[in-house]
Image (cartoon, rainbow, N blue to C red):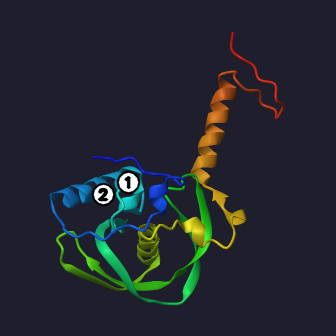
Amino acid sequence: MIRPILVVGNPVLRQKAKRVSQIDKSIQRLIDDMIETMKAAPGVGLAAPQVGVPLRLAVIDVDDKITVIINPEIVKTSAEVELDEGCLSVPGFWGRLDRAERVSLKALDRNGKELRIRDAEGLFAQALQHEINHLDGQLYIDRMDTLDKLQRSEPLRKREADEREARRAAGLEEDDESSTKTTPD
């Protein structure tokens, strides 16, 4: 089942998530729902707090490989690099921030077995750190030096331009930048 994704301003996104104490059918259902929601969005990762469940659980899809992390703990990081990042909970924007280039962590997989990820790099390392930040009540915008560098996402700009063009074509908006609007007869 696709679940609604919470957006910035919702207090659940700012709570430190609680550890998962038991991996039962309800947790398995939550994992399945999160994977479906992430793919439908579409996104690279999704943390349980983003769907309103304050538990330490996240799903990541990099290179068509789904990784489920439960109660993750970062055990090693490398030097940081500056990266572009966006978030399903901060729709329509992206920003530049520093993240470790490589990361190692321990967690449980969806079956409750110990999972060790060593020296993850690239998009996978970035997604792991991003989702773990969600579990700690942090958004990527909290890690930015300044929000002045927050940028609007290109797909949003294109959609807005397409909508303006459609309104112009329908006679609802003039071609120039004047504030005069026309309506169809």
Horizontally, residue 183 falls left or right of residue 129, namely right
Horizontally, residue 156 falls left or right of residue 120, namely right
Q: Mark 1 or mark 2: which is in front?
A: 1
Q: Position of residue 52 (x, y in %)?
A: 38, 54
Horizontally, residue 92 falls left or right of residue 25, namely right
Q: Work out whether residue 185 or residue 101 is closer to the camera in this orientation and state it.
A: 101
Q: Residues within 10 Å of mark 1 (few under 14, many from 20)?
A: many
**Can you identify the residue that label 2 sits on?**
35
> Toward which corner of the image does residue 118 lie, by quadrant?
bottom left
Q: Residue at x 67, y 34 (%)?
A: 164
Element type at mark 2:
helix
What residue type is disc 1 on? Val
**Can you identify the residue that label 1 sits on?**
51
Q: Is residue 75 above or below residue 2?
A: below
Q: Work out whether residue 59 or residue 137 is closer to the camera in this orientation and state it.
A: 137
Q: Residue at x 84, y 31 (%)?
A: 178
What residue type is disc 2 on? Ile
Q: Position of residue 121 (x, y in %)?
A: 43, 82
Q: Position of residue 132 (x, y in %)?
A: 42, 72
> Toward which corner of the image does residue 115 lie, by quadrant?
bottom left
Cα gap from disc 1 to disc 2, whole angstroms: 11 Å
